[in-house]
Every structure is written in C-alpha cells, then in structure tokens.
Image: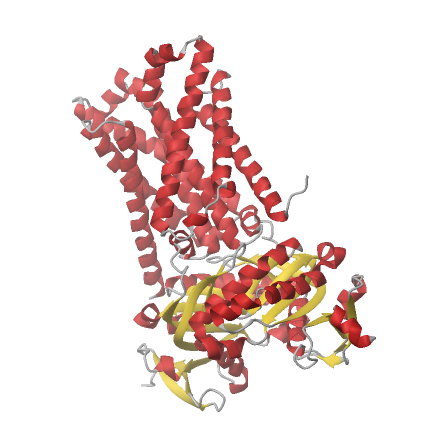
C-alpha cells in the first residue's frame, strides 16, 4: 500500500502525538502515585494512548472544511468542547473498567463502589482532566507554531542545533513573479496580496512532492532549498520548477476568474556552499549566508535578458543528469552584478510535443 | 534615557506576569475546592501574586538579557527547576500563615501541627504538580515568544492578520557598510559570526525603542514601527543613535574578534503598506507596499550620498525632533519622485 506524501506526513505526526500521550500519562502517574505500584502506570499509559489517538484523529483525519468559514472564537469553542468531552470520557471509562477488572466488580457494583465514587467526586478526577487538557493544548499549540515556522525550524530552534554556524551544501531555487509590478498596477496592493498567497498555496504541493523546503518569501520572490543530494536525486530541483509552472498553468482559469490576471514566473537554480546558522536574540531565525545566495539572486535577474523562464548555473548542471524531456541551451558568458569573474549559465527548456513538431 | 526605557519595559512585562499569576492562582481553588472555603481563594491569590512577583524578579533581574544566548532546553529546565523550588517554599509559607490564622495558631505552631502534616501528605503533591505544569508552560511560552519575535506569538494565536489590511508604518533599513568588501576578506563562517554579534548587540536597542524586527536579508535588517509607536519619544530615530552608541562601546570586542570596527548606515521611510500572512506549510507575516520599495532604494543611496542616516520627507514632516539632535536637508534625488531627503546629527555643544 502506498501513501501520498501528505498522508505519510499525517501518519508520522499522529505517531508522535500518540508517543507523547503515553509519555505524558506515565509522567503524571509517577508524580502523583509514586513508583510503588505498577497498576496506575497501566492506567496512565492506556489513557495517554487513547488521548493521543483522539487528538491525532481530530487534528489530521477529521474533515474540518466546514470550520474554515467559522470565526476564530467558534473554532476555539468547538475544540475546547471536543477535547473536554473526550478527555473526561476516556479517563472515566478507563478508570472504571480498570477498577471492574481489578476488583472483580460488575457495572452496577462499580457505580455503588465507594472508592470509585471518591475518585470521581474527590478531586483527583478533575485534576487528571485538567492535566490532560493542558497537555493537549500544549501539543496542539506547538504543532501549530511548527507549521507556521516552516519545516523543522522549531525543532532546530529548540535544540539549538545551529547555535554554532555550519557550512552546508545546498541547492537553491529562487522563483519570482516576473509580472508583479504590472499586476500590482492592475489590481492594487490588497488584491495582490491575495493573489500571491493563492500562488503560494498552489505551488506548495509540487514543492513538497519534490522534497523542497521553503526558506522564505521576500516581496514577490520565494526561495526554495534542498540538501545537495536531495536536490540532485531524480533531478528534483529541475522537475520542481516545471511542475510549479504546470500547476499554475492548470489553474489559469481560476486566476483569470478571480483576479483577471495570470501569474508568470522566472526561476534560477544554483548549488554551492552556504553558512547555516541561528541569528537574533529578540527574533531568532535560521538563516543562510554566503556567496551562493547572492549569485543565485543575480542569476535570477538575467532571466529577462535571455528571455527564458529558468536559468541554471553550470555547477548545477554538471551534477544533475538532465532528464530526457529537457534541453539546455548555453547563454553567453556573463558578468554578474557585483562579481568580477565570468559565469557559465544555461537556459533550460522543456520539450513539449509542439516543440518537437517544430523541430521536425 | 536608555536605562529608564529598559526599566519601564521590564516593569510592564512584570505586570503582565503578575496578572497571569493571579489568574492561575484563582483557577486552582476553583477546580479543587468548593466555594464555601474563602481561605482557599485567598491562598490562591496570595500564592499567585507573590509567585508572579518572584518570577518577574527572576526573569528580569536575575536571568538578564544575556541568557537569551543560552540554548533553549537547558534554559527552560534550569528556570523551571529554580522557580519550582521557590514556589514550594512560598506555598508552605502562605499555607502556614493563613491556615494558622484560621485556626488561631502561630506560624510555627501550625507548621508542626497534625493538620499541616496531613496537608503535606495529601493535597500538597497535587498543588505542586499544578505549579510545575503552569511554570513549565509559562517558561516555554516565553522562550518561544523570544525566539519567534516579539508579539508574533499573540498574532499566531489570534490570527489577527488572516485577512490582509492596510496600515501606516515606519520602516528603517539598516545595512553594514562595505559588507561585500568585508565578506570577501572574512571566511564565510566568520562573516556569519560578525552578523550574529552585530544583530545581538543591537537587539536590546530595538527592544527598548519598541521596534519590531521585520526581517533579516543577508546583512540587512529591517525594523518597523506602528506610526504612533515610532513617533512617540522619536523612538524610531533614537534607535539609530542608540545603535551607534552601542557599537562604539563595543568596538574593542569587534576589533579583537574580527580585526576592525563595523559601521552601518540607515534609511528611514514611512507610508501605507499592506500587512498580511502568506503561505501554507511555511507561513510568514509580510508587508507589501511602495514604502518598502522606496525605503530599500534609499538605503542603497546611503553609500553614494556618503550619509549614515537618511530620512524621507514623508517621515521628517511628522517626526518630532529630539532636543539633542538637529535635522538637515541633504537635497533632492531625481529617482525618488524628487523627494527631499534629510539627515539628522547630534547637536554640537556650544562653546562658551
């Protein structure tokens, strides 16, 4: 059975949630009841497992499209109610069943059982529910922040992995909206913001399918990066650009309908060493510095003058086996702005059927 | 001026912590006790209040600004552990005091009484777990808040900018002078370290002038203010002079580490921008607007104008000039809509 990338991501996140749930369950028990008895640990573990599954189900697998239209308050309310009910039910059922098995009680006997009543009304139950709710909120909150920061950034910030800068090799793809100025003139800044957001949502799928990582958005430019090996493998980086283009082309009617303009993009591909490190005390970011970044940015400027969609550097093309349906055409050697050596650049084209007919 | 601004900021944040402390102090008795026991609520309030005061002292006067450089996990753990010990002592003290009063016993008398013994073996552990969770949550959120930028967290939670909106803002572009030249002479790692040090050293200045770091792009840093925050006390312009002063004070460190003293120039502009949120799996708060575009161009002009600070006329007309500085026009630039540009300098002391 094969899963799509999104499904695999969801399953992986669910597993993390469940493991966290079990750990939290065991932790609570060890604080509350001490280490003397094994029986509370079984309860803690089972409750943690069940809550992990319930959380993962609600966050990843439940169809929440109807929620998009609701206000933020409504969404918070729905979540709070769902989790309170689930947490209370899970805890009370688990403890009840456990008591029934341990003390050989039938269900009516359980309801009359003094110990059980004391548990429910005596405060311990409320404490457990409160603890579990706090944890669910905590996990969800972090999941959300992680999503906002981008793939893996939160983890790197927390573990301090790039506290000391390191030199790494990366493939960079810079994309810009080449007709941005004209679009702004036509539809205004406010609409333009919606427009560019739409473009980003559209092209996120081809990017993650090709295992690219979005580094940041600067004005109408977007920077995508790969580990060197990832970007080279299956010519991911080159495919990525053309799949983005295809995606935007497919959605052209949609853009025309909503904004009456269509996005046109240029791209620049380059590979090389960069320094990766964390900066900033009041706003931390994991950033890349280095000549490779500057060069890629300069290459992007050249797209217009060579009237091509995408330019790749010779360093990159030496490392990638160009798949059969692409051709490369050498551009004249150029001097990039702010540099004093000539660079060799290539325009990359996709061979469509129409093109082949023309060649014949 | 600088230190008083810092103190004000610390006190403001302490106020917030105390408020949060009071809330959490009240939540506990709400769940654990019934409403007949007034002492429980009094205890909640007292513990919440004094706990928060201790927490603020710890956060702002013991763990200073420099602890931001520590790694995340050790910092959160060390802080949580320390505050946990503080809270345990605080809880015992408050309990002995109020419950002692209730039972007409002295502090120590209650401390050695069987009722207190019962409390220690019973409810105390629950209260401690509650405290531990709350402390961890507060510390963790505060650290995350520091990491991702001031106020960004609140916006994430409230989703304030889900719909783009127009705002009047001030933007300042700071750029290290001759950065290409410097980059060529330092190794890439060294250059990164230079930027790291530079951005760290100016952080505090940005914080106390209420600036918000919009982004880092290479060696450039963009700081932004809401119009009224930037204008108030001329915060935005003060930032420039605070930064210069800070670099001057630390110049020895830079000479020792990198062999020279870095300098920077800045361009200030203000105008209407669209503020919104972009992206799906990676999301970012962004500003779009002509003001940003122009400001960026002004910054590029700094070096050939030979000016460390340029201010657009749009901002200059709104900006109150602090008494210790003077504003000077530096002329018009053709490609800036023929806008007049200004610079600001410190007043020379008048010779007697």
| Tally of numbered discs | 0
Q: Residue furthest left?
A: B104
* Residue in view at x 58 percent, y 64 percent: B194
- Whether residue A264 appears in this view of the structure is yes
**In the rendered image of this protein, does residue A71 appear above or below residue A91?**
below
Q: Nearer the viewer, residue A151 or B246?
A: A151
Outermost residue on the top side: it is A104
Image quadrant in which you'd find residue B21? top left
- Residue B278 vs residue B342: left or right? right
Q: Which residue is drawn at 45% across and 8% down?
A: A104
Q: Residue B219 or A248: which is nearer the viewer?
A: A248
Above or below B97: residue A57:
below
Question: Measured from the top left, where is residue A172 in percent x and y?
Answer: 67, 63
Q: Residue at x 44, y 37 (%)?
A: A136
**Quadrant containing the N terminus of chain A in the rendered view:** top right
**Place of residue B57 in the rendered image (x, y in percent of width and height, measured from the top left):** 35, 46
Above or below, A121 relative to B192? above
Image quadrant holding the C terminus of chain A, namely: bottom right
Residue A309, how many percent across, how many down? Answer: 67, 73
Residue B348 is left or right of residue A278, and the answer is left
The residue nearer to you, when weighing A251 against B222, is A251
Q: In which quarter of the image is residue B107?
A: top left
Q: How is the image coloured?
A: secondary structure
């Amino acid at each position: 059975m094969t899963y799509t990338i999104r499904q695999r991501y969801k399953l992986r996140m669910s597993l993390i949630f469940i493991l966290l749930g079990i750990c939290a369950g065991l932790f609570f028990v060890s604080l509350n009841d001490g280490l003397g008895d094994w029986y509370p640990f079984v309860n803690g573990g089972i409750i943690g497992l069940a809550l992990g599954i319930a959380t993962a189900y609600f966050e990843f697998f439940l169809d929440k499209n109807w929620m998009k239209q609701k206000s933020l308050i409504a969404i918070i309310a729905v979540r709070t109610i769902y989790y309170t009910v689930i947490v209370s039910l899970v805890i009370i059922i688990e403890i009840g069943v456990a008591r029934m098995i341990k003390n050989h009680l039938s269900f009516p006997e359980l309801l009359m059982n003094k110990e059980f009543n004391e548990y429910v009304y005596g405060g311990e139950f409320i404490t457990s529910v409160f603890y579990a709710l706090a944890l669910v909120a905590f996990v969800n909150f972090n999941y959300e922040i992680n999503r906002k920061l981008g793939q893996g950034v939160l983890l790197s910030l927390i573990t301090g992995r790039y506290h000391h800068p390191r030199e790494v090799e990366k493939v960079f793809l810079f994309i810009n909206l080449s007709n941005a100025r004209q679009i702004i003139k036509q539809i205004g800044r406010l609409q333009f913001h919606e427009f560019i957001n739409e473009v980003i949502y559209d092209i996120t799928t081809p990017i993650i399918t090709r295992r690219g990582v979005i580094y940041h958005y600067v004005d109408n430019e977007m920077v995508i990066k790969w580990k060197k090996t990832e970007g080279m493998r299956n010519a991911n980086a080159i495919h990525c650009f053309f799949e983005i283009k295809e995606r935007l082309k497919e959605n052209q009617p949609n853009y025309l309908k909503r904004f009456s303009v269509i996005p046109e993009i240029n791209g620049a591909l380059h590979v090389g060493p960069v320094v990766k490190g964390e900066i900033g005390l009041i706003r931390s970011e994991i950033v890349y510095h280095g000549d490779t970044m500057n060069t890629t940015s300069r290459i992007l400027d050249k797209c217009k003058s060579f009237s091509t969609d995408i330019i790749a550097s010779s360093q990159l093309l030496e490392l990638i086996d160009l798949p059969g349906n692409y051709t490369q055409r050498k551009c004249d050697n150029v001097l990039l702005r702010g540099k004093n050596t000539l660079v060799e650049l290539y325009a990359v084209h996709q061979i469509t059927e129409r093109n082949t007919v023309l060649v014949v | 001026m600088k230190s008083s601004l810092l103190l004000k900021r610390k006190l403001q944040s302490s106020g917030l912590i105390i408020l949060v402390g009071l809330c959490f102090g009240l939540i506990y008795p709400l769940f654990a006790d019934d409403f007949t026991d007034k002492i429980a609520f009094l205890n909640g309030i007292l513990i919440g209040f004094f706990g928060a005061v201790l927490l603020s002292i710890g956060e702002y006067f013991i763990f200073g600004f420099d602890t931001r450089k520590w790694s995340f996990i050790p910092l959160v753990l060390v802080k949580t552990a320390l505050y946990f010990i503080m809270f345990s002592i605080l809880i015992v003290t408050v309990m002995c005091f109020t419950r002692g009063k209730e039972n007409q016993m002295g502090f120590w008398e209650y401390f050695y009484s069987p009722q207190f013994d019962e409390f220690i073996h019973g409810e105390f552990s629950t209260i401690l777990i509650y405290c531990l969770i709350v402390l961890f949550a507060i510390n963790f959120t505060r650290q995350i808040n520091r990491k991702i930028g001031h106020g960004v967290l609140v916006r994430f939670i409230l989703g304030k900018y889900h719909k783009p909106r127009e705002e009047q803002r001030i933007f300042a572009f700071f750029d290290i002078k001759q950065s290409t030249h410097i980059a060529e002479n330092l190794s890439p790692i060294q250059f990164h370290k230079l930027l790291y040090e530079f951005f760290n050293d100016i952080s505090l200045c940005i914080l106390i002038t209420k600036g918000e770091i919009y982004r880092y792009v290479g060696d450039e840093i963009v700081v932004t203010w809401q119009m009224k925050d930037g204008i108030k006390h001329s915060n935005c312009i003060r930032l420039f002079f605070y930064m210069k002063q800070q670099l001057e004070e630390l110049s020895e460190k830079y000479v020792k580490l990198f062999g020279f003293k870095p300098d920077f120039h800045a361009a200030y502009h203000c105008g209407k921008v669209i503020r919104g949120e972009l992206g799906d799996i990676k999301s970012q708060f962004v500003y779009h607007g002509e003001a940003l575009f122009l400001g960026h161009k002004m910054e590029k002009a700094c070096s050939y104008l030979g000016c460390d600070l340029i201010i657009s006329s749009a901002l200059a007309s709104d900006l109150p000039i602090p008494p210790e500085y003077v504003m000077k026009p530096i002329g018009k630039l053709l490609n800036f809509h023929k806008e007049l540009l200004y610079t600001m300098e410190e007043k020379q002391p008048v010779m007697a």
